[in-house]
């Protein structure tokens, strides 16, 4: 009530406005983010699985990565991702089978970490920061169903962002972040906000190894979306309060 009562005497900071200068290209990039050709590479369709000693198919890492990227980009469960891959392969290449959801879940634990992004050559102006991602588990179900209290679990994600392109070029535990300083916090916080808006603010994997893979997949998806279309915004005249 105190803030509302003194609202007319408080100092109001005018809202800044920004204008997108490359709107046609950015709009085309936004449409391209929904195209399956952005997420499924030709190499993934050319890799046929090998057969193990027990007759079980063995899929290459690129097939597992493709399934995980589709799941992250379109925010689907693993079973829905399996159905999408099966339908696509049936239409495009009936001789290749899609990995089932249990295989994708099991292989995600030991999957080699993907590269966060292709950093440009030469010196880089890096912005260093970290954010927390909530680990999604059985606690949410217990709280919603029975009202039970539970302790949230968070995973700390450290990353380095190229100030010029906005790409996430490195992730992990960065011991030198204190020495380098936190310059231009607004830019990297914008990247964090975009990540949580596009990918989500939580991790669905239970084990630490699978959580590392999920975070790496999320960064790769975020960078690919950014490469498809990025707004070139300039500050306009401030809006009067």
Image (cartoon, rainbow, N blue to C red):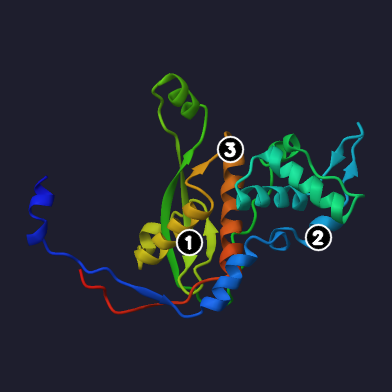
Residue visible at 68% across and 49% down? 112
Image location of residue 168, percent across then percent down: 52, 62
Q: From the image, tell me which residue sits under label 2.
A: 43
Q: Would you place residue 29 above or below residue 212 in this image?
A: below
User: Is residue 241 rendered to the left or right of residue 218?
Assistant: left
Residue 196 in the image: x percent, y percent? 47, 52
Give the number of the mark in front: 1 or 2: 2
Circles 1 and 2 in contact, beta carbons < 8 Å: no
Q: Nearer the viewer, mark 1 or mark 3?
A: 3
Residue 52 versus residue 31 in the image, above or below: above
* Residue situated in front as seen by the camera: 153 or 19: 19
Quarter that holds the N terminus:
top left
**Residue 186 appearing in the image:** yes
Q: Secondary structure at mark 2?
A: helix
The reply to whether callout 1 and callout 3 are in contact (CB within 8 Å) is no
Distance from Cα at disc 1 to Cα at disc 3: 23 Å
Residue at 70% x, 41% y is: 80
Specify few, some or many for label 3: CA neighbours under 10 Å numbering under 14, 14-19, or 20 or more: some
Q: Quadrant of the C terminus?
A: bottom left
Tell me which label, 1 or 3, sits earlier in the chain: 1
């Amino acid at each position: 009530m105190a803030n509302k009562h003194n609202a007319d005497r408080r100092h109001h900071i005018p809202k800044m406005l920004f204008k997108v200068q490359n709107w046609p290209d950015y709009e085309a990039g936004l449409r391209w983010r929904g195209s399956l050709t952005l997420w499924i590479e030709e190499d993934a369709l050319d890799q046929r699985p090998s057969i193990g000693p027990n007759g079980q198919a063995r899929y290459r890492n690129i097939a597992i990565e493709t399934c995980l990227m589709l799941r992250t980009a379109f925010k689907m469960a693993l079973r829905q991702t399996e159905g999408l891959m099966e339908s696509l392969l049936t239409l495009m290449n009936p001789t290749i089978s899609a990995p089932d959801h249990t295989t994708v879940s099991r292989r995600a634990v030991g999957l080699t970490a993907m590269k966060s992004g292709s950093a440009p050559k030469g010196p880089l102006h890096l912005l260093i920061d970290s954010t927390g991602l909530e680990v999604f588990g059985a606690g949410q179900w217990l709280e919603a169903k029975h009202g039970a209290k539970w302790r949230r679990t968070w995973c700390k994600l450290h990353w380095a962002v190229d100030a010029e392109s906005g790409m996430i070029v490195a992730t992990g535990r960065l011991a030198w972040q204190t020495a380098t300083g936190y310059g231009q916090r607004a830019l990297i916080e914008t990247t964090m906000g975009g990540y949580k808006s596009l990918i989500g603010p939580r991790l669905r994997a239970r084990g630490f190894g699978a959580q590392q893979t999920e975070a790496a997949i999320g960064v790769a998806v975020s960078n690919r979306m950014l490469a498809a279309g990025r707004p070139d915004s300039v500050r306009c005249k401030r809006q009067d309060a």
